[in-house]
Amino acid sequence: MISQLGILAFRSSVRCWRHRAVLTASLEARRWYSAPVRSGVKGMEEILARVVAPLPTYETRDKAPPPPESNSLEFMHFYRSLDKEDRLSLLTKLSQDFGVDHKSVSELAGKLLDAQLRDLATILQVEDRLRYCLTPRYKQLLSHISRVEGGVKFLVDLRTDVLEIISSKASENPHVRDLNGTLKSLLSEWFSVGLLRLERITWQSPCETLQKISQYEAVHPIRNWTDLKRRVGPYRRCYAFTHAAMPGEPLVVLHVALTENISDNIQGIVREFATLESEEDVNKINAAIFYSISSTQAGLQGVELGNYLIKRVVRELQSEFPHMAQFSSLSPIPGFSSWVQGLLSQYRKEGRGLDLLSEQEWKEVEQATDSDPGTSAVDVLRKLIGTSEWMRSERLTRVLEPVLMRLCAWYLYGEKRRGYALNPVANFHLQNGAVMWRLNWHADTSPRGVANSCGIMVNYRYFLNETSKNSALYLQNKVITASEQVLGLVSQFQKNSKL
């Protein structure tokens, strides 16, 4: 393994030397048009006035010559030179002063109303003029930036900054939100599924790619090279979507375990190394378990990639294993522990803390924890869930299993946001048409798994003949398709919690 790592390191250093040489030459070639960076509003105004071209008239929209490439490169260079505060100022100014011409829009809207009594051709022409007039001036700049080398990646990172501004409420300016909408629309076009390439990652993939796969793994962190080799080795598959405009950059990564049955714990997938050097036995591969999916580019938030990646991978696996019929996730439940803490606090505040558990269960909790007389049982339970100590007690684990399992079922099935599942992972798989199939106790006993979800994980199962129907039911009617196990646990929660 040491020699192999040495080879990988050598290859990486050679590539880095080549990239550095190319980058140096590129910078020298471009330095002549890179305007000196000027701080302050005046410098921003000058840059924007120079690089954001006026919107051509409706009549000349297809005849106007494109602005010089140097405009896009100058803006990119200037933006990268700014600190966080100045970027906010620039994006605010760009979106507000170089957006839609609202006066012209109002005039055309009035003409459209006046044209309603005229012939259809006239109406359609006025509508087309209005549609064109609704184009922000800065959209042209964004489109031209996408055509220069590194431009698409720049815009993805630019949207990352815009999303951070919005989420942190650094700016309440509605024009910034409009800029975000324009960027999202453009990126959705550029990253449509037809333009994406499915790539299988193996141990023979370039070392830079393997390093990025390790770096981007957000669900179950990769510990070392041996761990990484395991995850792209026998009985495992790793796939990524890539895009020609961002070479060598995985956009969304899916890890799959090939198993005999649908897995009920993550330890056997990411922690056992018995099959590291083994040959795959096709007869032992009956199920595909999607145990991790990670988006690598924050700027592509809201651009649908993960759904298409799962569908493409299913087709790929069906081609490789025609007999395979079981497809399921083994998913974490982020936020469950925090939700339980909040629920206990809410019930206690409302004076009905004892409603969550039966009288017998509360007695068992008190006995298992040797609580002092008069101590609030709700506080005891909150403290237990706030630590991982209870996992070391067989007695406490036995007492809390039915309690936490039914609470978890309700959290996934019953807690909603605008009518859809509150939990983001549940919402993702349900939108894809999966069934909320099975909750698994002691499925992730890592410190992270216990802290986030009390060690519980869930299988969202994909019955391929039913995914379209399930997806439509969820998206249109907000109906969650769930198994008898999940519905049974939900019923227990409603009964014990007097809902």
Image (tube, rainbow, N blue to C red):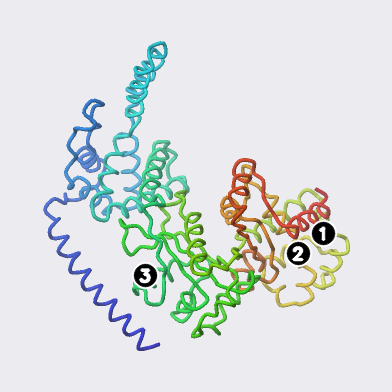
Image height of 132 relative to 156, above or below: above
Q: Amino acid at mark 2?
A: Leu
Q: CA gap, disc 1 to disc 3?
A: 49 Å
Q: CA gap, disc 3 to disc 2?
A: 45 Å
**Residue 212 placed where, x, y %?**
39, 68
* Residue that appears at 32% across and 58% down: 246
10 Å neighbourhood of mark 2: few (<14), some, or many (≥20)? some
Q: CA gap, disc 1 to disc 2?
A: 11 Å
Q: Quadrant of residue 440?
A: bottom right
- Of the 4 image quadrants, the one containing the N terminus is bottom left
N-term-proximal mark, 1 vs 3:
3
Badge 2 marks a residue whose secondary structure is helix
Q: Is residue 139 left or right of residue 388?
A: left
Q: Quadrant of residue 368?
A: bottom right
Q: Is residue 34 left or right of residue 468?
A: left
Residue occupied by mark 2: 381
Q: Is residue 330 left or right of residue 234?
A: right
Q: Amino acid at mark 3?
A: Thr
Q: Are marks 1 and 2 in contact (CB under 8 Å)?
A: yes
N-term-proximal mark, 1 vs 2:
1
Residue occupied by mark 3: 209
Name the mark nearer the viewer: 1 or 2: 1
Badge 1 marks a residue whose secondary structure is loop
N-term-proximal mark, 3 vs 2:
3
* Residue that appears at 42% across and 47% down: 165
Residue occupied by mark 1: 357
